[in-house]
Image: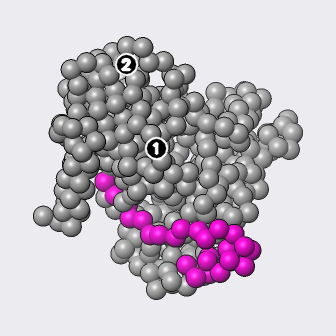
């Protein structure tokens, strides 16, 4: 048995005990889904574009048991999170609130897809940081979707389960996200990123080769929390729709660099810069996948840096803490760094030579301390397997 298998078994047993202690009976099973880091390709997913995320070794785990009635009872190991109970026959999306909206939304969307979901008891635990841009929400959605698919015998494929999770987030939680996060959580492969075309939903694994190249992927959680259901994320999405309409295309995916001079002529400055980010980011994703296949991860640093500049200056979704994290990591030896996730807070990632990891961490911590900011959480992540039953 591998170390990962041993860890998974121990986690499953611990969560099963917590479930039994809370509900007074055994779970039918334990399921797990990972968070994700987006290596490159930000805000391109809802523009029918290209993304290159990878599942990480930070996971959300759920113990679930089907019930004989239509009652759903949700409990968690989250500090301060109250248990939630509702009836599937009377549930409506406007009743959803807090963390429980994600599993409730999955059940709701499965039923809308024609799958009869029994009542169920669920206990959840997670080490994916909330609000850090590592997609804790998709990890929860995918773990629950896989569990309910198994328990109902629906046997849905992974792409279908990712779509269920996305619809739960869009229609019940109210966050206008694309399909990337759920796809990474469902389709992740060890040591690989997922090259996903968000127009036709085709995907393929792209080997990363970080270990062979002597690199670590460091996550720098700035502790500046963000929320996709509010504010700037929705505004950026709306601006992309408006930009595509002004350019006479169905989605910004239909534009390339040759279209940018015309876009600059007919669009005001801010809409143009939003469009330019999406167009150039799609090109960076394709180029990153190409370089990984031909030259390995040591060749992609400048693309990560360029992606961050585009998000900072054109899409304007970074923040001072993210910019500081990126700049300090680069000064500390990273070959490339960028913010990751929806923006307005959350995390940055840095590809760092193993021998420079301590220097990069020290540089980031010193930079935050010098400005009197909260101490960031800095940790390495590995490309991991997607959702599975433990």
Residue 240 lies left or right of residue 43; in this view the side is right
- The residue mark sitting in front, 1 or 2, is 1
Task: Please state the extent of the stretch shown in magenta in the rendering.
Answer: 361-385
Residue at 12 percent across and 64 percent down: it is 1
Give the mark, 1 or 2, whose residue is nearer the N terminus. 1
Residue at 41 percent across and 79 percent down: it is 214
Query: Where 189 sits versus 62, above or below?
Result: below
Residue 378 forms part of the magenta stretch: yes
Query: Where 74 sits versus 72, above or below?
Result: below
In three-dimensional space, the C-alpha distance between marks 1 and 2, rounded to whole angstroms, equals: 21 Å
Residue at 40 percent across and 17 percent down: it is 112
Residue located beneath label 1 in the image: 81
Residue 57 forms part of the magenta stretch: no
Q: Are marks 1 and 2 in contact (CB under 8 Å)?
A: no
Q: Residues within 10 Å of mark 2 (few under 14, many from 20)?
A: some
Residue 279 lies left or right of residue 134; in this view the side is right
Q: Secondary structure at mark 1?
A: loop
Whether residue 30 can be seen here: no
Residue at 37 percent across and 13 percent down: it is 89
Label drawn at residue 88: 2
62 or 308, which is in the foreground?
62
| Residue extending farthest left | 1
Residue 256, horizontal then vertical, whole percent:
66, 43
199 or 220, which is in the foreground?
220
Residue 251, horizontal then vertical, whole percent:
63, 32
Residue 133, horizontal then vertical, whole percent:
55, 52
Query: Where 359 sits versus 222, above or below?
Result: below
Residue 157, horizontal then vertical, whole percent:
29, 33
259 or 17, which is in the foreground?
17
């Amino acid at each position: 048995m591998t170390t990962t298998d041993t860890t998974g078994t121990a986690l499953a047993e611990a969560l099963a005990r917590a479930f039994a202690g809370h509900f007074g009976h055994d779970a039918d099973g334990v399921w797990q889904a990972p968070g994700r880091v987006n290596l490159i390709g930000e805000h391109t997913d809802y523009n029918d574009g290209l993304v290159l995320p990878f599942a990480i070794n930070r996971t959300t785990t759920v113990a679930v048991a089907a019930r004989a009635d239509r009652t759903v009872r949700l409990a968690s190991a989250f500090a301060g999170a109250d248990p939630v109970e509702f009836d599937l026959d009377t549930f409506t999306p406007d009743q959803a609130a807090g963390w429980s909206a994600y599993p409730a939304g999955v059940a709701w969307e499965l039923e809308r897809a024609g799958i009869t979901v029994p009542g169920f008891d669920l206990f959840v635990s997670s080490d994916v940081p909330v609000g850090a841009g590592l997609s804790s929400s998709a990890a929860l959605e995918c773990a629950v979707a896989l569990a309910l698919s198994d328990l109902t015998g629906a046997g849905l494929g992974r792409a279908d389960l990712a779509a269920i999770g996305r619809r739960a987030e869009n229609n019940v939680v109210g966050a206008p996200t694309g399909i990337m996060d759920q796809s990474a959580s469902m389709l992740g492969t060890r040591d690989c990123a997922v090259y996903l075309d968000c127009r036709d939903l085709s995907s393929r694994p792209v080997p990363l080769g970080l270990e062979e190249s002597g690199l670590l992927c460091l996550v720098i959680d700035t502790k500046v929390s963000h929320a996709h259901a509010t504010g700037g994320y929705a505004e950026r999405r709306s601006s992309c729709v408006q930009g595509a309409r002004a350019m006479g295309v169905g989605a910004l995916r239909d534009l390339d660099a040759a279209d940018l001079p015309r876009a600059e002529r007919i669009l005001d400055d801010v809409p143009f810069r939003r469009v330019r980010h999406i167009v150039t980011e799609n090109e960076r994703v394709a180029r990153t996948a190409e370089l990984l296949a031909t030259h390995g991860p040591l060749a992609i640093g400048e693309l990560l840096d360029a992606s961050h500049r585009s998000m900072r200056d054109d899409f304007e979704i970074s923040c001072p803490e993210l910019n500081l994290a990126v700049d300090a990591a680069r000064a500390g030896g990273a070959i490339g760094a960028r913010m990751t996730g929806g923006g307005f807070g959350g995390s940055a990632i840095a590809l760092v030579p193993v021998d420079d990891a301590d220097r990069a961490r020290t540089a980031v911590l010193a930079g935050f301390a010098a400005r009197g900011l909260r101490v960031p959480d800095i940790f390495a992540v590995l490309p991991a397997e997607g959702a599975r039953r433990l």
